[in-house]
Image (cartoon, rainbow, N blue to C red):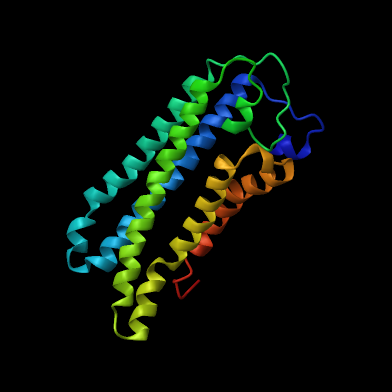
Amino acid sequence: MLINFLAEHKTISVNGCIAQMFFIILSGSEKLFILSAITYDHYVAICDPLNYMEKMRKEICVQLASGTWAMGLFHALLTTVFTLKLHFCGPNQISHFSCEFPHLLQLSCTETLTNQVVLLTSTMIFGSSFLFTLISYIHVITTILKVRSAEGRHKTFSTCSSHLIVVGLLYMTVFFQYTKPRSVSSLLLDEILSLQYSILTPMLNPITHSLKNREV
């Protein structure tokens, strides 16, 4: 980061660029999967509160956390392995803050069909994660609306409101960035979207997840 901010000529090796992409995908994937795990926690807490202690016991929480990292690692390794097979012999300038997968594919001088399939598969995996989150929150909101008192509805909704903010900010920008057609792509738009889901949203996490904390 210091090199990118301070250096006049910002350079990175091909292997360094791929390594950077690996850690971006690893952390980004884990972040999306852990949001789904938190969604499940909220679903159990609101829709099945009497069985919460049983369904969210320590062993289950450890399995959920370990599973998110395992899935993130698998996704990052899968993408990186196929990227290592690419050859770069033409343009070598990435018009972006970091070495993200779609921008790296644009510089390849070899066939990228397999990588495009991997990218599409990644989008489908994230889509299934989003679908799980969406269905869970439909049940959550339906349960909240059944609460008779307004105070009870407000108190129950406040349990998941901060999580909804993070989910909305993250999924909207990631999906738009990775599925938008090239006709609407621009350097400024790509940079703004990248800043949103890679820097701003993680920085807001401590605030949004603490909104219901009276001391904060």
Q: How far from the left and from the top, in percent, is residue 177?
A: 59, 43
Residue in view at x 52 percent, y 33 percent: 23
Q: Is residue 165 visible?
A: yes
Q: How far from the left and from the top, in percent, is residue 100?
A: 59, 33
Badge count? 0
Q: How far from the left and from the top, in percent, is residue 187?
A: 73, 40
209 sits to left or right of 64: right
Q: Nearer the viewer, residue 128 or 193?
A: 128
Q: How far from the left and from the top, in percent, is residue 176?
A: 57, 47
Residue in view at x 50 percent, y 62 percent: 165
Q: Is residue 209 visible?
A: no
Residue in view at x 18 percent, y 68 percent: 50
Q: Which image quadrant is residue 104 in?
A: top right
Residue in view at x 68 percent, y 48 percent: 192
Q: Nearer the viewer, residue 130 or 42?
A: 130
80 sits to left or right of 67: right
Quadrant occupied by the N terminus: top right
